[in-house]
Image (cartoon, rainbow, N blue to C red):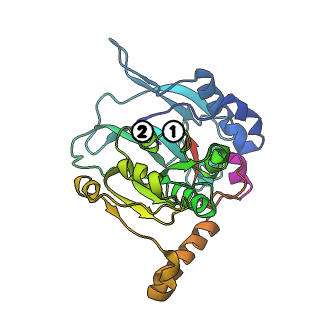
């Protein structure tokens, strides 16, 4: 990120080193090795007397050679309209690899820090920065998450829409839910859904709840819904149709919206058609997980990537 001040942290575990085989993959091997060896959290060295604050960056010092991870002096005072960002993840583009090989149309002066896409936390702003919009990740709770509808919901919410997904199912089915993209799971034969969701969300609750079990599970879900959230009863696998306590809807300003998808063919076929087309679009773009995944750089080099490929730093 030329000209910007970014803080990097652990990218890849050492166990992934063997995956780096192609030329562009070898370019990034030092980055992964350095960050793995440090096994650190955010690297931001606070300034000491007479010494500037530093941040860690992957530098391209010589075209076609591996990147070099070094401590770089950070700007002590931001200029007008500048922001300082603690990086949580950074995108990998084929153009970045070509740039490091000297084969891209834009040829920055050496040394440079490759990359143009990051996501993170704004920790400081310069003059003239009035407002920054913050994208809030939605938490989606899915019950009966290992079923056909549940897995499809987990896949769409986590992989296509970028939500934080909590999947609830019986213990023997939790692995498949995690594989599909859930960031956390709940064994609802053992754990309290309400307590676990509260724990996983820092007390905020789930913004969207796809509920297919009914009975006590529905009641537990409603008790851990976020303020302003929505719960979607889509079935009653338990055989018990729950009674909705209206006082919870009132105090949490939340809503319960029925979702009988088959009825859309009669009452709103246009919406049904649009939803199917959108799902197919996600599939074509590679945003749905499917049965396999490859290493990031190998995926890019083999021209298989269609969605965004990310290196997660947290």
Highlighted range, magenta: 295-303
Q: Is residue 128 left or right of residue 194?
A: left
**Mark 1: few, some, or many residues within 10 Å (few <14, many ≥20)?**
few
Q: Is residue 263 above or below residue 235?
A: below
- Which one is nearer the viewer's eye here, 168 or 238? 238
| Residue 213 rendering spot, x and y as whole percentages | 52, 58
Q: Secondary structure at mark 2?
A: helix
Q: Secondary structure at mark 1?
A: loop
- Residue beneath the point at 59% across and 56% down: 105
**Mark 2: few, some, or many residues within 10 Å (few <14, many ≥20)?**
some
- Residue beneath the point at 54% across and 58% down: 238
The chief SS type of the magenta part is helix
**Residue 138 in sight in this render:** no
- Residue beneath the point at 48% across and 59% down: 214
**Residue 66 in sight in this render:** yes
Question: Can you tell which quarter of the image residue 64 is in?
Answer: top right
**Is 45 contained in the magenta span?**
no
Question: Can you tell which quarter of the image residue 155 is in?
Answer: bottom right
Q: Is residue 297 left or right of residue 226?
A: right
Which label was assigned to residue 191? 1
Q: Which residue is mark 2?
A: 195
């Amino acid at each position: 990120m030329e000209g910007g001040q970014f803080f990097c942290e652990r990218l890849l575990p050492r166990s992934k080193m063997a995956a780096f085989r192609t030329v562009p993959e070898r370019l990034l091997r030092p980055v992964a090795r350095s960050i793995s060896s440090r096994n650190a959290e955010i690297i931001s060295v606070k300034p000491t007397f007479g010494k500037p604050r530093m941040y860690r960056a992957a530098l391209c010092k010589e075209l076609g050679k591996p990147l070099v991870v070094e401590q770089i002096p950070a700007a002590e005072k931001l200029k007008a309209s500048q922001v300082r960002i603690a990086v949580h993840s950074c995108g990998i583009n084929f153009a970045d690899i070509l740039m490091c090989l000297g084969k891209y149309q834009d040829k920055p002066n050496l040394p440079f820090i490759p990359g143009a896409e990051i996501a993170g936390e704004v920790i400081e702003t310069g003059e003239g920065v009035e407002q920054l919009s913050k994208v809030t990740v939605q938490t989606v709770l899915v019950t009966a998450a290992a079923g056909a509808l549940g897995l499809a919901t987990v896949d769409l919410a986590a992989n296509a829409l970028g939500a934080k997904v909590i999947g609830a199912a019986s213990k023997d089915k939790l692995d498949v839910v995690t594989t599909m993209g859930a960031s956390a799971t709940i064994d609802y034969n053992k754990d309290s859904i309400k307590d676990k969701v509260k724990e996983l969300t820092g007390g905020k609750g789930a913004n969207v709840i796809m509920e297919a079990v009914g009975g006590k599970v529905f009641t537990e879900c409603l008790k851990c819904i976020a303020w302003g959230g929505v719960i979607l009863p889509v079935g009653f696998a338990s055989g018990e149709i729950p009674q909705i306590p209206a006082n919870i809807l009132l105090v949490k300003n939340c809503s319960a919206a029925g979702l009988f998808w088959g009825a859309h063919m009669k009452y709103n076929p246009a919406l049904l058609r649009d939803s199917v087309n959108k799902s197919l679009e996600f599939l074509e773009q590679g945003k749905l997980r499917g049965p396999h995944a490859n290493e990031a750089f190998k995926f890019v080099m083999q021209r298989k990537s269609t969605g965004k490929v990310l290196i997660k730093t947290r």
